[in-house]
Amino acid sequence: MKISIPWWLTLIIVIEILPMFAGPYFALTNPGFMGGPEATAIGFAAYIYTARNVAVGLAFIIAYFLKSGPMLFILIFIRLITDLIDMPTFLSFGLATNEARVVAIFLFLYYIPAVIALRYLWKQMTYEKGV
């Protein structure tokens, strides 16, 4: 099911995709990113993290170019669930130097845009079906 993708949804999708490639870059170049401040070598977790994120990032790109509403919906939903776990993890393990900034980043760059995109995609998908 192809949907129309307005410019603002493209922006949200770009915001959703960038961390899927930037995070793995940092994980594979900075041992402290996944292993904590005392880490001196890239660990197994960094490779698993990279595989997960690159796979979802590539799926996002494919869904975008196919203009697949259901696929974009599922990927944004997966990303939202992941981020709902990531932020409390950052905060509970003390990985954030500025907690207010981390909350603001997740709220304004992940949670709110994801909810807006999910709502739009849901309406597009249900409108096409005539529900």
Image (cartoon, rainbow, N blue to C red):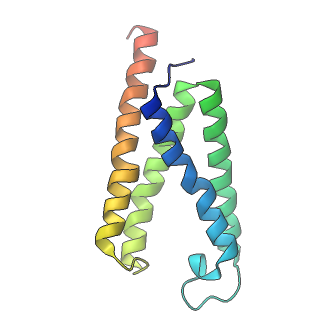
Residue at image location 69% in from the left, 78% down from the top: 43
- Residue lying at the far front in this picture: please name it: 7
Q: Position of residue 4 (x, y in %)?
A: 50, 19
Say which residue appears at 50% left-offset and 25% top-offset.
Answer: 5
Query: Where residue 67 sits: x, y (%)?
Result: 59, 24
Front residue (pair 7, 108):
7
Does 99 sit above or below residue 1?
A: below
Residue 124 vertical position relative to residue 104 in the rendered view, above or below: above
Q: Quadrant of the C terminus?
A: top left
Q: Residue at x 67, y 62 (%)?
A: 50
Instruction: Determine which quarter of the picture holds residue 58.
Output: top right
Location of residue 94 with respect to 50 vertically, above or below:
below
Instruction: Determine whether, in the image, residue 9 is placed left or right of residue 116.
Output: right
Question: Residue 99, position in %: x, y?
Answer: 32, 73
The extreme top residue here reads 130
Whole-percent x, y for residue 75 in the image: 54, 40
Q: Quadrant of residue 130?
A: top left
Identify whether 33 is placed above or below 82.
Answer: below
Number of callouts: 0
**Outermost residue to the left:** 100
For residue 114, side relative to residue 75 (left or right): left
The residue at the far bottom in this view is: 38
